[in-house]
Amino acid sequence: MGVNLNGVLLAVDAGNSKTDVAVLSPGGTVLGEARGGGFQPPVVGVSTAVDTLAEIVGRAWAKAGGAGLRPTFAHVTACLANADLPVEETALQAELLGRGWSRSVRVHNDTFAILRAGIDEPRGVAVVCGAGINCVGMTPDGRTARFPAIGKISGDWGGGSAMAEEALWYAARAEDGRGEPSELARALPAHFGLETMYALIEALHLGHVPWLRRHELTPVLFRVSAAGDPVALALVHRLAEEVAALSAVALGRLGLLEEEAPVMLGGSVLAARHPQLEERIRALLAERAPKAVIGFVTAPPVLGAALLALDEVAAGPEATRRLREHYGA
């Protein structure tokens, strides 16, 4: 006897580097899952990006028991990288609706998946710091807080890429005398087996060290900071300032500054729980949002997308419990 696929939901968490998809029942049972590559509509176009997503959805649907049948869902929640502006969400929603999977489609930026994965109800704020940085917030009545989060032109600073570039800048100036002395001038090139910043600059410029590998320097920065280097520590504290500023502004927009509310921290940089960074964030939020309750998200973001899908159909606490058990959260 086949699985009953009537009324099933589709949850999508599509990041820049990987995509996770889950087909689940309204009762919170995961029926099928699949993983694929990253979701990058700015690079390949919206239609091609969704074509790639459709292949992953098809595999999850087949695992749920739908092999040979057209994927059909009561609701689709898609938390997507690069859905940074409302106009981008609208375009992605239209493309998903056009695939005929469901008449009910909700598109969110993928940061909302991380937030929802870390909280018991759709209420709170999340700051995510991986390669870049972003912040979102939500309340049960549907209000949200968000930022464009598309780089320097939208006022952003932070994330592994930005910190690595700053570390290179300070290290170069430390070596040639334009800036304050710093252990970064030795530690950064040493990471690539080089002796000087000049050698590293040359290697990066000529492509002997691929520019994409600069993200490897962020852990080096934190290590140098932990050893007491004042230049590196200043960069760590600058990131803490950004995290605190994003959190406090988002809480204020949602009217949550005067009551206890979760501030969830996620992404590779924040989830690493570097003591100097975490202590500084806690100190700053104690001043600006003293009722904020800081937590760290370690659950997979697809859990958050699935919980958002359950929210859409007003699933009860038993469905939420079952889903969290499935993902070990």
Image (cartoon, rainbow, N blue to C red):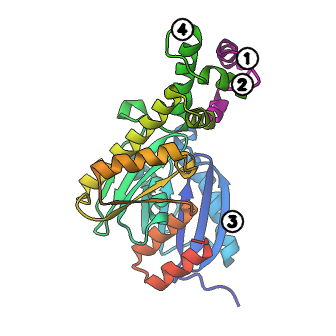
Q: Is residue 92 left or right of residue 286?
A: right
Q: Where is residue 292 in the image (x, y as percent from the top left)?
A: 34, 59
Membership of 206 in magenta stretch: yes
Three-letter code for the amino acid on which mark 1 is drawn: Glu
Three-letter code for the amino acid on which mark 3 is drawn: Arg
C-beta proximity under 8 Å, tags 2 and 1: yes
In the rendered image, the residue lying farthest to the top is 177
Distance in Å between CA atoms under marks 2 and 1: 6 Å
Three-letter code for the amino acid on which mark 4 is drawn: Gly
Q: Where is residue 34 in the image (x, y as percent from the top left)?
A: 67, 64
Distance in Å between CA atoms under marks 3 and 1: 49 Å
Distance in Å between CA atoms under marks 3 and 4: 57 Å
Split into 4 quadrants, where in the image is the N terminus? bottom right
Q: Tell me if mark 3 has few (under 14), some (14-19) or many (20+) residues whose alpha carbon lies within 10 angstroms of its own.
A: some
Query: What's the mark number on residue 59?
Result: 3
Q: What residue do we see at 50% from left, 27% from top?
A: 230
C-beta proximity under 8 Å, tags 3 and 4: no
Membership of 29 in magenta stretch: no
C-beta proximity under 8 Å, tags 2 and 3: no
Q: Tell me if mark 1 has few (under 14), some (14-19) or many (20+) residues whose alpha carbon lies within 10 angstroms of its own.
A: some
Above or below, 18 against 227 in this view is below
Query: What's the mark number on residue 50?
Result: none
The boundaries of the magenta stretch are 192-217
Task: Please name the residue that numbered disc 4 is placed on.
Answer: 177
Task: Please name the residue that numbered disc 1 is placed on.
Answer: 195
Distance in Å between CA atoms under marks 1 and 4: 17 Å
